[in-house]
Amino acid sequence: MVVKEFVIAETPNPALLRWQETRDAATFAADMTGFFVAAFGPSLFGGSEPLHDLFASRLEAAIARTPDEIARPLVTATLRIARR
């Protein structure tokens, strides 16, 4: 396999935009936690709801305590790969 193209681009982040407008840490924390858990939860927690809930509650609390530390634009990486 060979990488033919690699592009990193800023991705729209409605949670960040709302945070910049309102500075509501609780809402920002809930938004970011929801995004992360929806995107990565199934592969991280499988069917374990207790693990899912524990992680989500701790992540949300951590973000709410220090939202400025993670209030950054999201980026995506697009790869185009080919067989040799």
Image (cartoon, grey):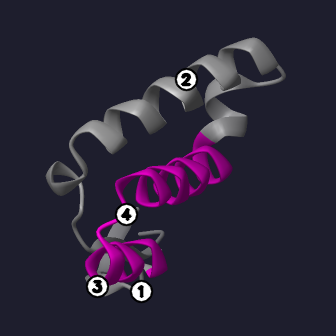
The residue wearing badge 2 is 55
Q: Which residues are magenta?
A: 14-40
Observer able to see residue 36: yes
Residue 2: x and y in percent read 33, 68
Circle 1 packing at 10 Å, graded few (<14), some (14-19), many (20+), is few
* Numbered label attached to residue 34: none
Q: What residue did someone put label 3 on?
A: 9
Instruction: Measuring from the top left, give residue 83's x and y in whole percent.
Output: 48, 69
Q: Is residue 74 magenta?
A: no
Residue 48 seen in the current view: no
Circles 2 and 1: CB atoms closer than 8 Å: no
Upstream in sequence: badge 2 or badge 1: 1
Q: Please determine whether, in this image, residue 58 is positioned above or below residue 81.
A: above
Q: Amino acid at mark 2?
A: Phe
Find the distance from the CA under tag 4 to the CA under tag 3: 26 Å
Q: Toward which corner of the image does residue 72 lie, by quadrant?
A: bottom left
